[in-house]
Amino acid sequence: MTSHPAFVAGRGAVITGGASGIGLATAHYCADLGMPLFLADIDAAALEAASTTLRASHPGLTIETIVTDVAKRQDVQRLHDRAVKAGPIGLVMNNAGVEGGGGLAADAARWHEIIDTNLWGVINGVQIFTPTLMAQGGPAAIVNTGSKQGITMPPGDTAYNVSKAGIKAVTEALAHDLREAGSLVTAHLLIPGFTFTGFTRKRVAEKPDAAWTPAQVVDFMADRLGEGDFYILCPDNAVTPAVDHKRIAWAAGDIIHNRPALSRWHKDYQAAFDAFIKQGD
């Protein structure tokens, strides 16, 4: 497995949403490499629990926890300032997020909660950390956690879809700007599949067979980072890469073929979509 050059002992790993799920799994991965950890989360108790576990398994490693509301720019700035004091940063993972449940007609407060955390949290992280990473002069990676919903737009969860579509746009623009600047900093969009995280646990007590564990997602992410992938599109135990590719192609095809919006869920196009998915099986 080829490793991203930023993942080396001594370079800090800044992870928002780091107290659980994919963020915590990434923290364990980075700790195993000897990377100092700067874990941010809005849940102070979960942060303390994560820190206790990590310290027990990695004695002597720098592990700092910073209670952070990523929607608040001053909180992200404080996180930045704490991490920079310790030395060069190898990874910034803008991973903090809240789950969906905000339909088109949901109240404004719910929309703000989702957009402010999921999208503005990433924007804040990108704008505050990128200049510092570029000024370091060495390799670094910025990983933003998106979602397949931000690409295929399933109906009924509009606010979440908008937030994740925005993350895709921000991360694509960041990758372009870094490339044009000739920077050693790279940007990547993590697109998890069905993963058993705290969000999932609110609905089911045990991991569904279809779901990956957060550690599986991180292992896949690390492998693809090493290969230089921008779009890190994760499968799971139920959805193969081939099916993901077809779903994404169908969504883009709505524009190309002038189909109704979200035709995948339109009763008049169900048979055509099903046939498209089965092509090549």
Image (cartoon, grey):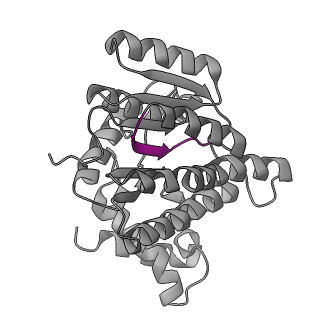
On whether residue 35 falls in the magenta region, the answer is no
Image point 49% across, 51% down: which residue?
Answer: 132
- Residue closest to the far bottom: 257
Give the residue at x 35% y 41%: 217
| Visible residue check, residue 72 | no
Q: Horizontally, is 192 left or right of 35 in the view?
A: right
- Please provide percent x and percent y for residue 164: 57, 58
In which quadrant of the rendered image does the N terminus lie?
top left
In the displayed structure, does residue 92 sit left or right of residue 66? left
Does residue 247 appear anywhere in the picture? yes
Q: Nearer the viewer, residue 264 or 51?
A: 51
Residue 90 is covered by the magenta coloring: yes
The part of the chain drawn in magenta is: 87-98
Q: Position of residue 130 (x, y in %)?
A: 50, 55
Image-based side of 165 in relation to 245, left or right: right
Q: Position of residue 135 (x, y in %)?
A: 44, 55
